[in-house]
Amino acid sequence: MQKHLQTLINLLTKNDLKALLQHYLDSSETENTVQLGFMFQQGQIKLSSFDYYQQLATSFIETKGFSIGLIAKIKTSNTLNFFTPALQIGGNFNKTDHQQRNVLHYLFTNNQLIAASTQPPFNYLRSMMLFGSNDALLDGLCQRDQQNLTPIEAYLFANINFTSLANHELTALLALIEIESKQQEVNQTNYSLFIQAVSKLCRDQALLTNHELQRIMLIATYYTTSIKQVVSDMNQIAG
């Protein structure tokens, strides 16, 4: 076990909050990312201690700032739930890493797990926008990464989980698409890239590219074109 992590565990055992904070401040950003990951894991293992570890992690981030290395680690509903209080501090939702990606980019393109239960938490995020002051979350929804993709475009472009979204998640995603469209114009030059990329993903998974595929409907909605046109364009690529 890494020395900095062992020190963290020892201080947690003693519940020495002052020493814990100082140790975190003295650690490197890479070490901070590992330490925050450990606290997240402990919060999942010991649900009775979830609030304690969440508050501790939030206070560390609030004091030192958001660890850029943490951005790519927030890929699931569980990690988002744990780090939400920290993300709501100081515009952390729109902090970006070396790929100009924010937390939403990684949440929406999490390809590590394929089960339906691991789909992006669209409804959770939409609720945050509706019932709280989350300007950074709104800004993050509209940010473009190095590939010139917003988080929603990244989902449509690269997420390999083609399992249909549950109705409440689908409704939430459509609402997020509408929210984004009101903030900025859709970059139509990305459309042809989408057709090629998604067509390849469909071929790789032996999926039929027809009107029954939800992803095609979502691409049509995002780019304000017809499902028939998207299907035709994709079939031309496949042909």
Image (tube, grey):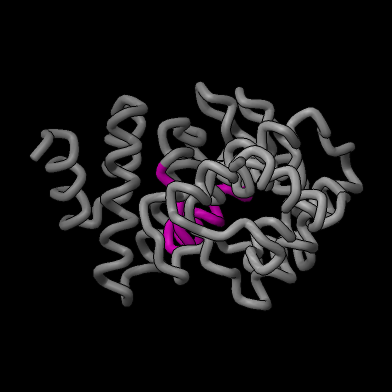
Where residue 41 sits: x, y (%)? Answer: 28, 58
Where residue 154 sits: x, y (%)? Answer: 61, 41
Q: Which residues are magenta?
A: 73-88
Quarter assignment of residue 43? bottom left
Is 81 included in the stretch rendered in magenta?
Answer: yes
Residue 170 in the image: above or below residue 147:
below
Is 2 included in the stretch rendered in magenta?
Answer: no
Q: Residue at x 52, y 41 (%)?
A: 200
Q: Quadrant of the C terminus?
A: top right
Where residue 223 sits: x, y (%)? Answer: 82, 46
* SS majority, magenta: helix
- Res. 106 visible in picture: no
Left or right: 62 with respect to 50? right
Residue 28 in the image: above or below residue 132:
above
Q: Quadrant of the N terminus?
A: top left
Where residue 138 sits: x, y (%)? Answer: 76, 47
Q: Nearer the viewer, residue 165 or 47?
A: 165
Q: Residue at x 56, y 50 (%)?
A: 108
Q: Nearer the viewer, residue 23 or 164?
A: 164
